[in-house]
Image (cartoon, helix red, strand yellow):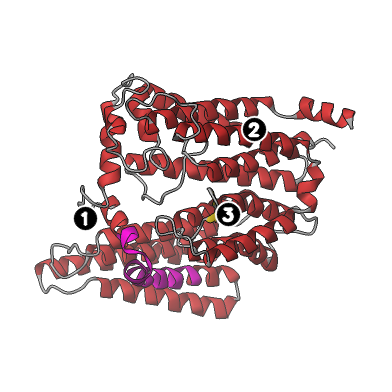
């Protein structure tokens, strides 16, 4: 037993632990700055936000120590059991009578509130790594692919039912892991196209072209569908590349003539022309598929039809599925609505706070915007604005460099794993941290939607800090035992 413990401390990656501790300390000082009230300088008082965060940091360090002391095989052996327990907690939380900020994602145990969604991330990562680590697993087998998607989507659906959409979206980061392990790039391509269709379709849905008849949003999306279908035809139907060039050339020419006719002769909805062109492509793909029986034709056909269905479902989802506050946040982000006193208030105040910090910042505890509480949620979701105001551009860049080094180190650890279980889990950890960092910093700067997810190790809160600590230290223990 003594030899095992000694070997753990020699094998554990101290560079990652060092970065973890530095980020933890920087995060605590940020919480101090964000929650500080004039006349209350005692940050060690457990009745203050800073004091509570310090207590949770101590608990996190103890938790990390315990996780390192467990056998690395423990996480592989009990991955499905841990996943099942967390799924039951997520399901039970749906019926929780305690509602906090419109969400039923919290379990209240006296003075302590825990959010199972934060801990479900590491459980899902373990289950996914366990399943994909099986010797017989192959991304090319449809049933394996569907099972992996099920492991990811099941907790995601349960969290959505808790009205915690932001935390649910974090699970999309697992698709980066699937791509790393051999998932076809067409799925990632389809996802990117869906995002583009949504943004363009929503942003320009009410704008009309010069003919005052054709909506820019529908025209642009249908044009993209025809263009991308032609490009896919060129890439995957090598025997018919000449015809693919005809498709692209003729389609572009017909659309251009239709636009000119609509603008200068008789105004009409040019989208109809694009729909006819897309239908012609679909019919020709069906003809080729039944003649040559090549799956590539069916894949392109599914993309074209799927793009059409997705585009016409956007309006329904945007107006009937999304909550009112989610809808207005997207509209503000896309520039459709200007609501500086409502949905855009958080982002506007955050930008003001960051901009007021200048290059060097106003100094620790000297941020006027944060001290006067102009920024809502400034010690949780919007804590990065405190860094920007007090430490300026220099401090903000330093924090981002620390996070970059942290993520790159996780990538190095993931690639050096000797088992697929360790590699998949490592990339799950990396993807979750990257998603949180990108979305949180993006929403503070106003370049991504405000979905309410914490900045790792910085945002105030015990559940998120413990969740990130468990996620990281489980991986460090798996990495420490990689040679065995």
Which residue is identified by label 2? 61
Q: Give whichever of discs 3 and 1 has the lower sequence position.
A: 3
- Is most of the magenta stretch helix, strand or loop? helix
- Quadrant of image for the C terminus: top right
Any mark on residue 337, and which? 1
CA separation in Å, label 2 and label 1: 45 Å
CA separation in Å, label 2 and label 3: 20 Å
Q: Secondary structure at mark 3?
A: helix
* Horizontal side of residue 194 vs 60, given as left or right: left
Range covered by the magenta-colored residues: 302-327
Q: Residue at x 59, y 42 (%)?
A: 466
Any mark on residue 54, and which? none
Query: Against 182, is 60 above or below?
Result: above
Q: Is residue 409 magenta?
A: no
Q: Give whichever of discs 2 and 1 has the lower sequence position.
A: 2
Q: Secondary structure at mark 2?
A: helix
The quadrant in which residue 35 appears is: top left
**What is the x, y in percent for residue 456?**
51, 38
């Amino acid at each position: 037993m003594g030899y095992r413990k000694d070997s753990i401390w020699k094998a554990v990656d101290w560079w990652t632990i060092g970065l973890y501790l530095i980020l933890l300390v920087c995060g605590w000082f940020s919480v101090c700055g964000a929650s500080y009230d004039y006349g209350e300088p005692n940050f060690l008082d457990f009745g203050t936000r800073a004091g509570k965060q310090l207590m949770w940091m101590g608990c996190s360090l103890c938790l990390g120590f315990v996780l390192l002391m467990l056998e690395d095989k423990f996480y592989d052996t009990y991955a499905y059991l841990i996943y099942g327990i967390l799924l039951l907690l997520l399901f039970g939380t749906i019926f929780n009578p305690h509602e906090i900020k419109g969400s039923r994602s919290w379990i209240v145990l006296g003075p302590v509130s825990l959010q199972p969604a934060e801990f479900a991330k590491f459980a899902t990562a373990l289950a996914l790594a366990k399943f994909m680590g099986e010797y017989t697993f192959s991304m090319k087998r449809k049933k394996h692919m569907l099972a992996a998607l099920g492991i990811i989507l099941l907790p995601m659906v349960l969290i959505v039912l808790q009205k915690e959409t932001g935390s649910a979206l974090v699970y999309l980061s697992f698709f980066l892991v699937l791509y790393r392990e051999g998932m076809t790039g067409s799925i990632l391509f389809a996802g990117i196209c869906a995002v583009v269709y949504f943004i363009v379709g929503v942003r320009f849905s009410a704008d009309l072209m010069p003919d005052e008849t054709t909506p820019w949003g529908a025209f642009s999306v249908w044009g993209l569908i025809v263009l991308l279908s032609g490009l896919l035809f060129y890439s995957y139907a090598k025997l018919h590349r000449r015809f693919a060039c005809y498709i692209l050339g003729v389609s572009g020419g017909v659309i251009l003539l239709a636009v000119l006719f609509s603008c200068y002769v008789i105004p009409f909805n040019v989208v109809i022309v694009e729909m006819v062109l897309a239908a012609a492509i679909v019919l020709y793909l069906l003809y080729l598929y039944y003649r040559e029986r090549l799956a590539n034709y069916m894949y392109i056909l599914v993309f074209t039809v799927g793009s059409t269905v997705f585009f016409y479902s956007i309006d329904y989802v945007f107006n009937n599925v999304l909550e009112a506050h989610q809808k207005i946040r997207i509209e503000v982000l896309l520039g459709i609505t200007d609501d500086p006193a409502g949905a855009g208030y958080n982002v506007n105040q955050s930008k003001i706070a960051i901009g007021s910090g200048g290059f060097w910042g106003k100094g620790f505890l000297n941020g006027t915007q944060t001290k006067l509480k102009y920024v809502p949620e400034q010690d949780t979701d919007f804590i990065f604005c405190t860094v920007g105001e007090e430490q300026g551009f220099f401090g903000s860049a330093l924090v981002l460099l620390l996070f970059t080094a942290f993520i790159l180190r996780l990538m190095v650890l993931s690639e050096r794993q000797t088992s697929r279980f360790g590699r998949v889990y490592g990339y799950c950890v990396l993807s979750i941290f990257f998603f949180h960092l990108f979305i949180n910093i993006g929403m503070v700067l106003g370049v991504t939607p405000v979905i309410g997810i914490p900045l790792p190790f910085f945002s105030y809160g015990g559940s998120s800090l413990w969740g990130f600590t468990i996620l990281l230290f489980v991986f460090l223990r798996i990495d420490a035992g990689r040679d065995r």
